[in-house]
Amino acid sequence: MRACALRAGALWLLVGALAACAPATAPPATQVRPALPAAQQMLAQVRAAGAHAPDSLEVQPLPDPAVADLRQSAAQLEAHADYAGAAKVIAHALTIRPDSPELLQQAAELALVQHDWAHAGQWAQQSFERGPQVGSLCRRNWATLHFVAMAHADAVATQAAVTAQAACTQRPPPRY
């Protein structure tokens, strides 16, 4: 019986020695969510990204009179920090012009300020796909997608959005 106990003790010593030699495994990495700016700061940064660059190609569609009044109403509501009300007005405008890249981006920005990440990302992506893919609207699309990626702690998508936003600024063709 004593020999059996000695063998069991030796076996445990061997297991312990082997465990000490095994490479240490790091604990699973936890995703750290980067600090997002306040909602109004995000909105201001998205709109600043869309500021006209004088040496950049811009594609501007003709204003749509069917939704101009609705966009004006939404702007007034937004000026009073009624983002939910402004979003409802833009949603109504989208029923009139569902493929409008500018309306889709405006809806994305209002969703962003309300931390509705799913809709903000969806509408900014649709706006990019239907829009000119250059210029100020493009930069606003990718600035919105940048914040959505940050909210999801997706470092790869965050970097991709920064790169894509930089590609939106293109020099206009030379004029003769």
Image: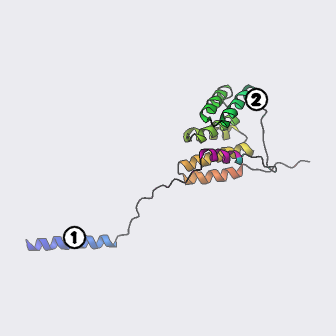
Q: Residue furthest front?
A: 80
Q: Nearer the viewer, mark 2 or mark 1?
A: 2
Q: Is residue 2 left or right of residue 40?
A: left
The image shows residue 137 at horizontal and vertical percentages of 71, 42
* Amino acid on which the number 1 mark rests in the picture: Trp
| Element at label 2 | loop
Say if 143 sits above or below 71 in the image.
below
Q: Was residue 35 drawn as part of the magenta stretch in this picture?
A: yes
Q: Nearer the viewer, residue 9 or 69?
A: 69
Q: Was residue 42 drawn as part of the magenta stretch in this picture?
A: yes
Range drawn in magenta: 27-47
Q: Are marks 2 and 1 in contact (CB under 8 Å)?
A: no
- Rendering quarter of residue 25: bottom left
* Amino acid on which the number 2 mark rests in the picture: Asp
Residue positioned 67% across, 50% down in the render = 164
Residue positioned 72% across, 48% down in the render = 168
Q: Which residue is mark 2?
A: 64
The image shows residue 91 at horizontal and vertical percentages of 63, 30
